[in-house]
Structures are given as structure tokens and as C-alpha cells.
Image (cartoon, rainbow, N blue to C red):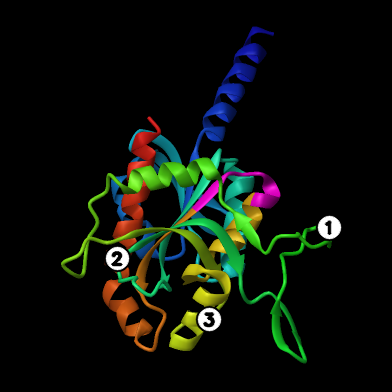
């Protein structure tokens, strides 16, 4: 009987530790590399065909994973992570195309809300965006999925403490606002301007809204952090290849500072 009591206590403590983890996802190796380099007590865990890494980052228990590119990969990775690790919150970090007219590579966007811009219907008027559908089949009323306000506030405060890498004489700017998600790498000036005009989107990427949808469905607080690798224009691919590492480091810098301030 005594041994069963100890076993129950051990399991209870183990579950409590697991529940206190912060989950961190990035779509590319470059986006999580600096975090893995700083991870203490690192252990590899295989789940659902994916590799996750547990350990301590700036004093916080974390689980880090690579989601893969695109909404399907991101949704699958998020579902596996949330199911197996039951984290208390999730941070998505990485790069994106900047949409603000004044944005430069290296600038940062803290996503206050996410929108999926390739989900909808095509009728006589052209493409019409629609809200996400619930698992039950009904639609959400809002086109946008809102990040956790407290995590957004903490990320904004953390960003003020980070020394970002820059491509110019001006220091990188930090924007807070809408991030647009679609299974498209945008490299067209007209499309970029339309995303900014129609949805006030400050960045365009391929995973955030899918991750946000899973987190909202399962009740997990989240925030999406992006640093601009390009301006989603005709030179986007060239700029992406040139600045992806710089942008990934800037985004990861906020993650590290955010975790540090949680101590």
C-alpha cells in the first residue's frame, strides 16, 4: 500500500512538471537552432514520427519542435505536441514576409491575432474569405483568432530588452498586429499590398493560423512571433535566402527574453 502511495505521488509530480512546460515551435531548422543550442538538460523524444526536445531554457521547462512548412504540417505537429506534452502555453517563432510599407528584414511582428487568407469560396465576385470551421462543423463568427493577451503583453515587454540584428543603420522595429497565414509563399508586390490593405496584416507566413486554430480548439494560450526575412515582393525569395538566419535569430531572441522574464 505504501509503495502504491509513492507511485501515485511520483505520477502526480510528473504530470505537474509536464503541465508547466512551455511549448515552442518553428517551421524550419534555422528557426529553432539558436533555442536548441541554448537548451539545458536536452533530451530527444520521438512522437508521431516527429522529434521533440525537452529541457530547460533560461530556467523554464520547455519542449521544442520543428513543425515543418505549411498549414497541414503545422497543424499535425501542434496536435502531436499538445496531445503528448500537455504544455501550459505555446510560442511559435520564425520568419515571415513583412507587409508594413516601412518594414525591413529583421523587423519583428508580434501577432495579436491570426487570419487564414486562403480559406473561403470562389463565386461570381471572385474569392471570398470565410471564418474557420469548428470541429463540429459550424463556423466561427470572427475571421481572426486572437493570441493570448497576456503572452502578447509579455512578448512586447521582452522585445524592448532585446538587441536585434539589423541590416541597416536603423534598429529593427517591433510591430504588433495581424499575421496572415496561407499555404503560399508570397513574392508579389500587389498581393502583399492587398493583404495589408484588406486585413491590416503586418506579416505573411504559412503556419501561424493553423497553430492558432489548434490552440484555440484545445484551450491552450499561444502567441506567434515573426521576424521579417523579406518584404513579400518580387525579390522575396532572394531576400529570404539572404536574411532568413538573421530574422530567425531576432525572433528567437524574443523567445529567450520572454522565458527569462517568466522566472
Please rate how many residues cluster around mark 3, counting C-alpha atoms within 10 Å: few if below 14, some from 14 to 19, many from 20: few
Q: Quadrant of the N terminus?
A: top right
Left or right: 54, with 19 as reference point: left
| 222 inside magenta stretch | yes
Distance (Cα) linking label 3 and label 1: 32 Å
Q: Position of residue 103 (x, y in %)?
A: 34, 70
The residue that mark 2 highlights is 106
Q: Residues within 10 Å of mark 2 (few under 14, many from 20)?
A: many
User: Where's residue 37, x and y in %?
Assistant: 29, 50
Pick out the residue farthest to the left: 169
Tell me the magenta residue range: 216-223
Which disc number belongs to residue 194?
3
Quarter occupied by the C terminus: top left
In-image side of 128 versus 95 (left or right): right
Please, is residue 148 above or below residue 121 in the view? above
Of 196 and 207, the residue lying toward us: 196
Of labels 3 and 2, earlier in sequence is 2
Residue 138 lies in magenta, yes or no? no
Q: Secondary structure at mark 2?
A: loop
Dot 1 corresponds to which residue? 136
Q: Single out the mark in the foreground, 3 or 1.
A: 3
Q: Nearer the viewer, mark 3 or mark 2?
A: 3
Dot in front, 1 or 2: 2
Vertical relation: 207 (above or below) 256: below
Q: Earlier in the sequence, mark 1 or mark 2?
A: 2
Q: Residue at x 57, y 50 (%)?
A: 81
Place of residue 165 in the rendered image (x, y in percent of width and height, measured from the top left): 22, 60
Front-most of residues 256 and 151: 151
Identify the residue shown where x is 34% and y is 54%. 252
Looking at marks 3 and 1 on the same chain, the residue that comes earlier in the sequence is marked by 1
Please, what secondary structure does the residue beneath circle 1 have? loop
Amino acid at each position: 500500500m505504501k509503495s502504491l502511495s509513492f507511485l501515485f505521488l511520483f505520477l502526480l509530480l510528473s504530470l505537474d512538471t509536464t503541465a508547466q512546460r512551455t511549448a515552442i515551435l518553428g517551421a524550419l531548422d534555422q528557426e529553432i537552432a539558436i533555442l536548441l543550442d541554448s537548451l539545458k538538460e536536452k533530451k530527444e523524444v520521438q512522437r508521431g514520427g516527429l522529434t521533440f526536445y525537452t529541457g530547460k531554457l533560461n530556467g523554464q521547462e520547455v519542449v521544442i519542435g520543428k513543425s515543418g512548412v505549411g498549414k497541414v504540417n503545422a497543424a499535425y505537429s501542434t496536435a502531436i505536441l499538445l496531445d503528448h506534452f500537455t504544455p501550459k502555453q505555446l510560442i511559435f517563432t520564425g520568419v515571415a514576409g513583412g507587409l508594413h510599407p516601412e518594414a525591413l528584414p529583421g523587423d519583428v511582428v508580434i501577432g495579436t491575432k491570426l487570419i487564414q487568407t486562403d480559406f473561403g469560396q470562389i463565386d461570381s465576385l471572385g474569392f471570398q474569405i470565410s471564418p474557420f470551421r469548428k470541429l463540429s462543423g459550424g463556423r466561427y463568427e470572427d475571421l481572426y483568432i486572437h493570441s493570448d493577451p497576456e503572452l502578447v503583453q509579455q512578448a512586447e515587454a521582452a522585445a524592448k530588452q532585446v538587441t536585434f540584428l539589423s541590416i541597416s543603420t536603423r534598429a529593427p522595429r517591433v510591430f504588433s498586429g495581424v499575421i496572415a497565414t496561407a499555404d503560399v509563399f508570397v513574392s508579389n508586390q500587389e498581393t502583399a499590398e492587398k493583404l495589408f490593405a484588406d486585413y491590416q496584416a503586418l506579416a505573411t507566413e504559412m503556419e501561424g493560423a493553423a497553430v492558432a486554430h489548434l490552440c484555440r480548439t484545445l484551450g491552450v494560450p499561444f502567441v506567434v512571433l515573426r521576424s521579417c526575412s523579406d518584404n513579400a515582393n518580387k525579390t522575396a525569395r532572394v531576400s529570404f535566402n539572404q536574411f532568413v538566419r538573421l530574422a530567425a535569430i531576432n525572433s528567437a531572441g524574443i523567445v529567450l527574453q520572454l522565458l527569462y522574464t517568466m522566472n
